[in-house]
Structure formats: structure tokens, C-alpha cells
Amino acid sequence: MTGEVAVLYRPGNAFVAGVASPYSLMTASKGVYGEAAGEWTAADALGFSKMVGLPGMFWARAGQQQ
């Protein structure tokens, strides 16, 4: 990493309180998120959401068949 890291120390713990870097990929002017990135279409996002939701749907259905 090139930049600065702020660390907060507590007894038995260390927490990252913040980071700053001129090469950060999280800089709003450099990053593109969501459909604007061109990697996902709206249909892709819908399909992904359905796939991620399948385990919960199966669990709910299994609980109803008692």
C-alpha cells in the first residue's frame, strides 16, 4: 500500500480507522459502480438476485411442508 493508514488501538484489539492513498480504487472520480461499469446488465442483476435468493426460498418451502 502506498499512503497512510490510521489505526486505533484498544486493549487486545486493533481497528483500521481510515486509509488514504493517491492510488485508491475507491476514489469516486476513478470508480464506476453498478450497471455503469458495463459488466452487468439489468437482466444479469435480476438473475443473480434470484440465484442468491434460492436457498432462502427452499428453506421457507421446506418449513411450510409440515
Image (spheres, rainbow, N blue to C red):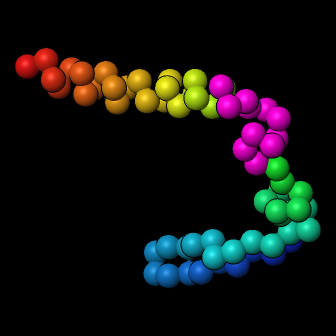
Q: Nearer the viewer, residue 2 or 13?
A: 2
In-image side of 24 versus 6 (left or right): right
Percent coordinates x, y for residue 43 in the rendering? 65, 25
Residue segment shown in magenta: 33-43
Q: Nearer the viewer, residue 49 or 3?
A: 49
Residue 61 placement: quadrant: top left
Residue plotted at (33% across, 26% down): 57
In-image side of 29 versus 39 (left or right): right
Percent coordinates x, y for residue 48 in the rendering? 58, 27
Q: Nearer the viewer, residue 8 or 58?
A: 58
Q: Is 39 contained in the magenta span?
A: yes
Image position of 27 with respect to 39: above or below = below
Percent coordinates x, y for residue 1 in the rendering? 84, 62
Image position of 19 with respect to 55: above or below = below
Residue plotted at (15% across, 23% down): 64
Q: Is 29 contained in the magenta span?
A: no
Residue furthest to the left in view is 66
Residue 18 placement: quadrant: bottom right
Percent coordinates x, y for residue 24 in the rendering? 84, 61
Q: Nearer the viewer, residue 14 or 23?
A: 23
